[in-house]
C-alpha cells in the first residue's frame, strides 16, 4: 500500500493547480477548468474542498453544500488519481444509471480511485452505494480513508472490507492496530448504501455510519466511535478493490458525495 514520493508530489501539485468544479442549482454539473494531468493524476471532479477548514468548496444550498463529487459524464479523470490496470476502472450502466466499476483482476494488487486530500480537524459526510462480486473467500478493501506515509502510521485509519458473506468497518489506530467496530451480512451482486460522518483527528476523531439508510450501532454499544481517523502527513479517500488474491473482484459503486449534511451526501446513492 506504499505510495512513492513522486506520486505524492504529483497529488499535491494536482490539488494546488486544479480549479474546483461548480455544482449548479437543480443538480446540473458544470466542470471548471482543470489542471493538466501528470502521471496518474487527473482532474474533473464536480466539486472539491472541505467543510470547516476554510478551503474552497462549492455546491452551496440553504441547507448545506456539496464539497466533492466525481462526474460519470467526465469519466475517471473526475478522480484525483486512479490506481488500476489500464481499462479496468470505468463507467458502466446499471439499474442506478451510470456508475463506476473497479475490476481487480486475479493476481493484481488493487483497482482504486482516489478522492481529494483531507484536512486534520475537518468534519464531513460522505455517501455512496456499492455492490461487490468477489470470486474467492479473501476480503477486499472497498473503501479506505488512507494516509501517507503508509509505514509508521495508521496506514488506513478507516476501511470497509468485504467478502462474499460479510462487510466490515474497521478503525486502525496510530500503531496500525485494527479495531473491528461493525459488521453486517453481504452477498455478491447486492446493492447496499453507505454513509459516514467523519471528524478527522489522530486520537479524537469520530465515525458515524448509516447502512442501507439506517443509523448503525458499533460494537462499543455507541452510535459514534471515537479514535484515529487521521494520521501521517496527507490523508485522502479511496474506493475500489484492494488486496491481491487468486480470484478476481468487482466493486461497482455510485458517485461518492462529500457534503456538509447527511441529506446532500446521500442524495445520489
Image (cartoon, rainbow, N blue to C red):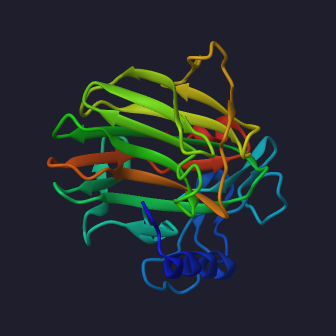
Residue 163 location (% of width, % of height):
29, 33
Farthest residue to the top: give it: 221
Residue 93 left/right relative to 116: left
The image quadrant where one finds the N terminus is bottom left
Q: Position of residue 14 (x, y in %)?
A: 59, 79
Nearer to me, 13 or 258? 13
Residue 78 in the image, given as x and y percentages of width and height = 49, 67
Q: Is residue 240 above or below residue 190?
A: below
Q: In screen coordinates, is 77 left or right of 174?
A: left
Residue drawn at 25 percent across, 63 percent down: 88
- Relative placement, left or right, of 136 versus 181 is left
Q: Is residue 196 above or below residue 260?
A: above
Residue at 83% from the left image edge and 52% from the top image edge:
52
* Image coords of residue 32 (percent x, y): 62, 75
In this picture, residue 89 sits left or right of residue 257: left
Answer yes or no: is residue 62 visible.
Answer: yes
Residue 268 visible here:
no
Q: Residue at x 49, y 48 (%)?
A: 144
Image quarter of residue 64? top right
Number of marks in the image? 0
Amino acid at each position: 500500500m506504499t505510495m512513492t514520493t513522486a506520486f505524492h508530489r504529483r497529488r499535491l501539485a494536482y490539488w494546488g493547480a486544479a480549479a474546483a468544479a461548480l455544482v449548479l442549482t437543480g443538480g446540473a454539473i458544470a466542470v471548471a477548468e482543470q489542471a493538466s494531468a501528470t502521471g496518474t493524476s487527473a482532474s474533473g471532479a464536480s466539486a472539491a474542498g472541505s467543510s470547516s477548514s476554510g478551503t474552497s468548496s462549492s455546491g452551496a444550498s440553504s441547507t448545506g453544500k456539496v464539497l466533492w463529487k466525481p462526474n460519470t459524464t467526465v469519466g475517471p479523470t473526475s478522480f484525483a488519481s486512479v490506481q488500476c490496470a489500464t481499462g479496468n476502472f470505468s463507467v458502466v450502466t446499471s439499474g442506478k444509471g451510470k456508475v463506476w466499476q473497479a475490476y481487480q483482476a486475479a493476481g493484481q494488487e488493487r483497482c482504486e480511485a482516489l478522492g481529494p486530500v483531507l484536512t486534520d480537524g475537518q468534519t464531513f459526510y460522505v455517501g455512496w452505494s456499492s455492490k461487490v462480486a468477489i470470486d474467492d473467500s479473501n476480503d477486499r478493501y472497498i473503501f479506505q480513508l488512507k494516509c501517507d506515509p503508509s509505514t509508521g502510521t495508521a496506514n488506513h485509519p478507516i476501511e470497509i472490507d468485504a467478502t462474499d458473506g460479510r462487510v466490515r468497518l474497521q478503525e486502525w489506530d496510530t500503531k496500525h492496530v485494527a479495531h473491528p467496530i461493525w459488521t453486517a451480512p453481504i452477498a455478491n451482486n447486492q446493492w447496499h448504501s453507505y454513509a459516514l460522518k467523519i471528524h478527522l483527528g489522530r486520537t479524537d476523531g469520530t465515525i458515524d455510519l448509516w447502512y442501507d439508510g439506517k443509523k448503525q450501532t458499533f460494537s462499543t454499544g455507541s452510535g459514534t466511535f471515537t479514535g484515529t481517523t487521521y494520521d501521517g502527513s496527507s490523508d485522502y479517500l479511496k474506493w475500489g478493490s484492494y488486496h491481491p488474491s487468486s480470484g478476481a473482484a468487482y466493486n461497482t459503486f455510485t458517485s461518492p458525495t462529500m457534503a456538509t449534511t447527511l441529506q446532500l451526501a446521500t442524495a445520489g446513492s
